Amino acid sequence: MYDKGWRVHTEFKAYQVLKQNPFWWTHQRHDGKLWNLNNYRTDMIQALGRVEGILEHTLFKGTYFPT
């Protein structure tokens, strides 16, 4: 046998790495630069529906504030 299980090893390597990666919550686009979160902040605000969308779905819904 040529590969001696290396193909199977490489297929399951992704699952093993995810379990041991303490920075699984970081995004490759932001390079894990935790000291400069300005780009991450703007991307998250945009993804969550801008400031108005965030307030409408959290603060206003929780306090029954009419919008």
Image: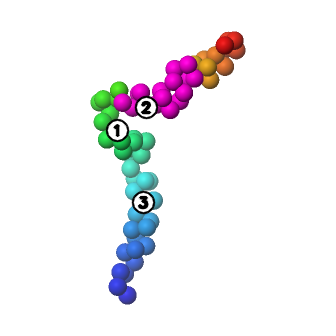
Q: Are marks 2 and 3 in contact (CB under 8 Å)?
A: no
Q: Which residues are magenta?
A: 39-54
Please give the name of the residue rendered at 51% of the width and 24% of the height, measured from the top-left corner: 50
Q: Residue furthest top?
A: 66
Q: Where does residue 49 sit, x and y in percent of width and height? A: 54, 27
Residue behind mark 1: 30
Q: CA distance from mark 2 to mark 3?
A: 26 Å
Please give the name of the residue rendered at 40% of the width and 63% of the height, measured from the top-left corner: 13
Q: Amino acid at mark 1?
A: His
Q: Quadrant of residue 31?
A: top left
Please give the name of the residue rendered at 40% of the width and 53% of the height, measured from the top-left corner: 20
Left or right: residue 36 versus residue 27 is left
Q: First in sequence: mark 1 or mark 3?
A: 3
Q: Is residue 14 above or below residue 45?
A: below
Q: Is residue 30 above or below residue 37?
A: below
Residue behind mark 3: 14
Q: Is residue 27 above or below residue 61?
A: below
Q: Are marks 1 and 2 in contact (CB under 8 Å)?
A: yes
Secondary element at tag 3: helix
Residue behind mark 2: 43
Q: Where does residue 43 sit, x and y in percent of width and height? A: 43, 31
Q: Quadrant of residue 9?
A: bottom left
Is 34 included in the stretch rendered in magenta? Answer: no
